[in-house]
Image: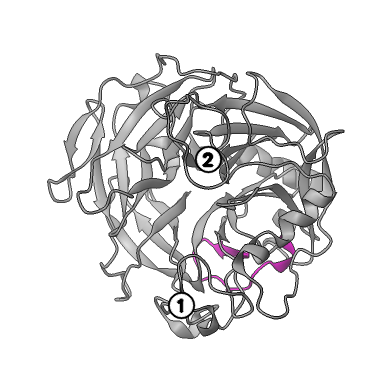
Amino acid sequence: MDRRRFIANVVAGIAGPFAGVACAGAQGGAQAAPGGYGPLRPVPDLRDGKVRLHLPEGFKYRSFSAAGEKFSDGSTVPGRHDGMAAFSGPGDSAILIRNHEVNGPVGAFGDKDKAYDPMAGGGTSTLRVTRYGEVIKSAPSLNGTMMNCSGGPMAWRAWVTCEETVNGPDVADDFSGGDNARLTKKHGYIFEVPVGRTATARPIRSAGRFPHESAAFDPSSGAIYLTEDNFDFPSGFYRYLPPKHPVMAGKLLDGGRLQMLAVKDAKRKDLSLGQDPGAAYPTVWVDIDDPDPDFRGKPSNDEVVQAVGRQGRAEGAAIFSRLEGAVFHQGTIYFVSTQGGETDPADPPPSGFGKGRGQVWAYETWSGRLKLVYESPRSSALDLPDNVTVSRRGTLVLCEDGEGDNYLRGLTRSGRIFDFCRLAPIPDDPGAEFAGSTFGPGGHTLYVNVQAKQGRSIAIWGPWERGLF
């Protein structure tokens, strides 16, 4: 089979948890969505009877693989469950690759001899589970990385995990107060984690050293689109062009080119601000000449965290607020700006860069056009969206990281928001949030993580046909 036909077959085969939403209409306000599932009610966890979620009638769930429990190999499950993807496993099982957003030089979980940095506590775990959240097998799959926030599933059955940090022995301590001098490697990279085997723990340095969040793969071009969550400073939307198409190579190669998105004829366009409904922009890409800069004299974390983005903005790259989740579908990358937009003045502004309650953007890889999909008018409609996935019917599932109750919300193809699931309050952990939503094979189960002091994964199933998931 020649290269063109091979890649075309890969494009045609990408579906399920890899898919995105068809073009959603930009809306300036919340609307009642007939695609919802009805009122939410407290539902007990089938694992132990505790109420952890509020769901519509007919839906059930089971939690599994909580922090502090054991993997199948006897090692301990770390906390801070974050981004995740589901791949098809034997029978009707799913293989989940899950991030752990652990910061600081706390020591690697699992086998330290395999760790990228034996002092770093983040990484990924791989689990084989049933459609009902029963764990068949589990183990660490990448360790010794740090702040593994989100990432993205790849068409060659791999997960790309992203470090949302620039910590390292060459950088002054970050906001957490951890001792960077104890680290043995530089952090702030993306790593590939293959399905079915342990990762090589080799960073893709040409894809940049910055606070990475998500990765979305365009099988037509072979580009990896990357989001940046720079909490206190402007963020950018990037793409990494590897030296060989990853499907043909069978893996993601280092040595490619990093670029940053700019609005055509509008240098440093500030898209973190409120947008008109239906806003759309022609775009171009600017090169990042030094994606992995060397630093002397142990500069501040604030300086290093902006080093790559400043190169792009000097060439005119667009400004966003806290770019987080991203997903690919039919030539379009949908990505989330957590604090973008302009919201009701009655809402207290969130801390960090950006004063809105969230935007969803769509970048057409085939036309280069950037479009606004949705902008939250107030926190009660959508409050600080984070990770994102998509249903079989083309409805986005948005994980909230808000300041009050946190929801899983649906964003329909017509741009309407509805509530699907609410996280029950955790008395000693008001910062708990949803992360890592992903549909399993066939769409039977929505897997999602709860990032909390004791994080856990959850499998949700029920009458999906009743609504638009």
Report whether 373 appears left or right of 175.
right
Q: Residue at x 57, y 71 (%)?
A: 167
Tell me where residue 221 sits by quadrant.
top right
Please state the extent of the stretch shown in magenta in the rendering. 188-207
* Front position in the image: 356 or 259: 356
Count neighbours of disc 2 (C-alpha within 10 A) and say few if under 14, some if 14 to 19, many if 20 or more.
many
Whether residue 314 appears in this view of the structure is yes
Query: Does the CB distance between marks 1 and 2 fall below 8 Å?
Result: no
Count neighbours of disc 1 (C-alpha within 10 A) and say few if under 14, some if 14 to 19, many if 20 or more.
many
Residue topped by disc 2: 338
Please tell me whether mark 1 sits on a helix, a strand or a loop: loop
* Front position in the image: 316 or 283: 316
Query: In the image, residue 156 lies at what x, y percent?
Result: 62, 54
Q: Outermost residue toward the left? A: 49
* Front position in the image: 208 or 17: 208
The image shows residue 86, relative to residue 407, as above or below, that is below
Q: Amino acid at mark 1?
A: Pro
Tell me where residue 168 sits by quadrant.
bottom right
Q: How many marks?
A: 2
Q: Outermost residue toward the right? A: 265
Residue topped by disc 1: 105
The image shows residue 137, relative to residue 297, as above or below, that is above
The image shows residue 240, relative to residue 350, as above or below, that is below
Q: Residue at x 14, y 46 (%)?
A: 50
